Amino acid sequence: MGLPKNYRKNLNITPHKQGAAARQEILDNIANPGTYLPKGILHEDMDRDFIEYVKNNINLTLGGEEVPIVFLSIQRWAEFAKTWQFSDVNKNIKIPFITIVRKPDAQVGTNYAGAYNIPGKPTFTYMKIPTWDGNIKSFDIYQIPQPVSIDLLYEVRIFCSRMRDLNLFNKKMLKSFSAGQQYLRINGHPIPLMLESIGDESVISNLDERKYYVQLFTIKMLGYLLDPEDFKVTPAISRALSFFEVVEDDDDFVTHTIEAQEDTGAITLSVQFEPGVNVFNYTVENNATYNTVTIENISSYSLTLNGLPVSIPPGFEVGHGDVLGISITKSDLGASAYITLSGIMP
């Protein structure tokens, strides 16, 4: 019994990654080899890859010869017409040819679907890399800013003298955008393209007074800018900084601990009052703003800064050298009491 017609014995099956594996693959492509930072993306990167996209995906071959493609600005068109290498002996442009013009008025991007960036140009942690200097194990924090959304409009024109050549290019363009959009991998970043419109500019003639077909394809790139100059690499603290102070009065004492996280700016001041002690004066060592308090075995408390009362809420600022006074009333006089002030360093 023979195999049915159109039966294929050899199938080229390429597995497609999905979910977390697909996201990791995108991250690996974006990462800059040799560093832990992603690749940046600027105007020239988007222009370069768009030209390559047209050359590699919508190229046209007629009569065994590839139709030339050239990237131009509007201002350079007149100069190009006289110096272009694909011209006849009289320096007239030969057809067919394809031009790419990027409109100079780049617009605020729409790839965030109407969302807004966080104001203030903050940077966000991209990756934490462990480090070791032979004595201390720590890590470096790699931070990047939120990308700046930008829309670029490209005009792709085909100049030809035969309708069938025009139809062929039109077909290739529509097939390329048959899914409604196309994606480019610009320095590893996935950037969408949208076919905005198709127009006709055929009412022109060349120096020989012959009519030409000119069809215009307007393509929008929903890109974004990620400037490598805005990347930051900062060393993180290897551990919290802890300071202990013991104030002895016979067998009664107070213990305080400061924990300052330099990478996040968080700071906490924890004070333990042993039985018999209800007052503690602390000379401030870190500039900070304290806005949260937690207590244990304390029925009431009061705070002073350089002798003046302060409270939480709303919170208060302290500076190096200030004297912070804490006075408490314990619920259980025979047990230890605890108070913790939390805030942030500038």
Image: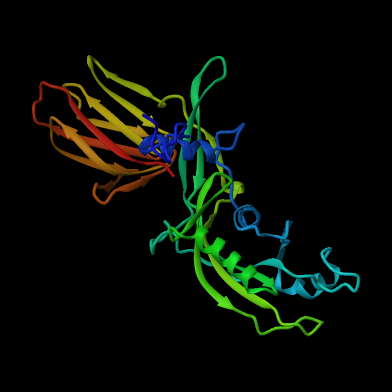
Q: Quadrant of the N terminus?
A: top left
The mark total stands at 0
Residue 232 is left or right of residue 81, and the answer is left
Residue 104 at least partly seen:
no
**Nearer to the camera, 204 or 269:** 204
User: Which of 110/136 is in front?
Assistant: 110
Q: Residue at x 43, y 41 (%)?
A: 6
Residue at the image point whose x is 32% and y is 33% from the top: 269
The residue sitting at the front extreme is 1
Q: Position of residue 2 (x, y in %)?
A: 39, 31
Give how far across and how far down residue 167 sits, in percent: 58, 69
Quadrant of residue 91 within the rendered picture:
bottom right
Image coordinates for residue 321, horizontal then vertical, percent: 43, 38
**Residue at (57% x, 70% y) in the render:** 217
Residue closest to the eye, 216 or 252? 216
Q: Position of residue 13 (x, y in %)?
A: 44, 34
